[in-house]
């Protein structure tokens, strides 16, 4: 499969690239600053493009089978990057006849879902409110405007850079978060990257969101 990766120079994006290459996919890393990407591989190419340009993304996506977005933006308001980049990506996918899309968001994109779950969680969600709200707006855009694409939204908890946990992830279709005894609030980026790449060939969560977590 030929896969385009948005957010390719970020910490999660680089792990998505590594995982996809390990599984035998051909990868195109799409970046505003390609020089930031140090990975080298015979099946990896790097394309310079703006994530907000339909024209540049259309050219970058042409000939691909799928797109994975691991984009991240600053929490400082106003936060519009998730929606604006996704609108451009969806238009470009249509123009280049690419159907499969896997997108990274987070727990509690509906910030009201954190209410009643403790002071510190609510404080943390409030700290990230603008970021999470724009993520949710992006999810709602896919739900209402991208029914012609085969998209999957992946919602992990807090990301860390520890080694991947060798376990089957806890998965909850449609959930805003996963909590409770035995479930960790943080998850290694490597586990998230692995799960996102696995979705490229798995239609279980087609046009759905899924929350994921590791056992504590």
Image (cartoon, rainbow, N blue to C red):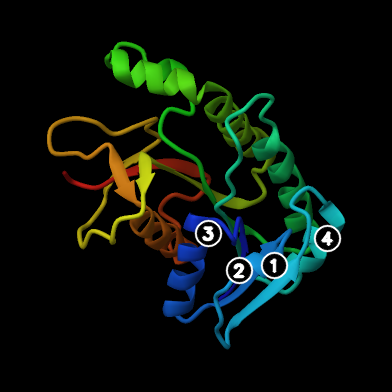
| SS state under label 2 | loop
Mark toward the viewer: 4 or 3 = 3
In front: label 3 or label 1: 1
**Vertical comparison of 70 with 73: above or below:** below
Residue indicated by mark 4 = 56
Q: Is residue 42 above or below residue 179?
A: below
Question: Which is in the foreground here, disc 4 or disc 1?
Answer: 1
Residue topped by disc 2: 37
User: Which residue is disc 3 drawn over?
Assistant: 13
Q: CA distance from mark 4 to mark 3?
A: 19 Å
Earlier in the chain: of badge 4 and badge 3, it is 3
The tally of labels here is 4
The nearer-to-camera label among 4 and 2 is 2
Q: Residue furthest right?
A: 55
Residue 18: where, in percent of width, then height? Answer: 46, 72
Secondary structure state at the residue bearing disc 4: helix
Residues at marks 2 and 1, CA–CA distance in whole angstroms = 6 Å
To which quarter of the image does residue 174 belong? top left
Q: Earlier in the sequence, mark 3 or mark 1?
A: 3
Q: Secondary structure at mark 1?
A: helix
Q: Work out whether mark 4 precedes mark 2 in sequence or the reverse, and give the earlier one.
A: 2
Mark 4 vs 2: CB contact within 8 A: no
Q: Separation of disc 4 and disc 2 at Cα?
A: 19 Å
Asked whether the beta carbons under mark 2 and mark 1 sit within 8 Å of each other, the answer is yes
Q: In the picture provided, is 106 more to the left or to the right than 72? A: left
Which mark identifies residue 34? Answer: 1
Q: CA distance from mark 3 to mark 1?
A: 13 Å
């Amino acid at each position: 499969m030929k896969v385009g990766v948005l957010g390719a120079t970020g910490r999660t994006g680089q792990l998505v690239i590594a995982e996809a290459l390990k599984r035998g996919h051909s990868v195109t890393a799409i970046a505003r600053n390609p020089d930031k990407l140090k990975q080298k591989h015979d099946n990896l190419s790097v394309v310079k493009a703006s994530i907000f340009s339909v024209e540049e993304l259309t050219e970058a996506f042409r000939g691909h089978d799928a797109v994975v977005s691991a984009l991240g933006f600053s929490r400082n308001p106003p936060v519009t990057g998730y929606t604006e980049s996704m609108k451009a990506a969806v238009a470009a996918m249509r123009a280049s006849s690419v159907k499969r899309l896997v997108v990274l968001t987070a727990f509690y994109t509906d910030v009201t879902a954190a209410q009643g779950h403790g002071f510190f969680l609510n404080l943390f969600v409030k700290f990230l409110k603008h970021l999470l709200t724009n993520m949710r707006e992006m999810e709602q855009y896919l739900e209402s405007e991208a029914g012609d694409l085969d998209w999957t939204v992946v919602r992990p908890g807090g990301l860390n850079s520890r080694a991947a946990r060798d376990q089957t992830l806890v998965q909850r279709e449609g959930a805003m978060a996963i909590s409770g005894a035995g479930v960790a609030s943080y998850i290694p980026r490597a586990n998230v990257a692995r799960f996102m790449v696995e979705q490229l060939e798995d239609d279980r969560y087609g046009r759905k969101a899924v929350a994921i977590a590791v056992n504590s």
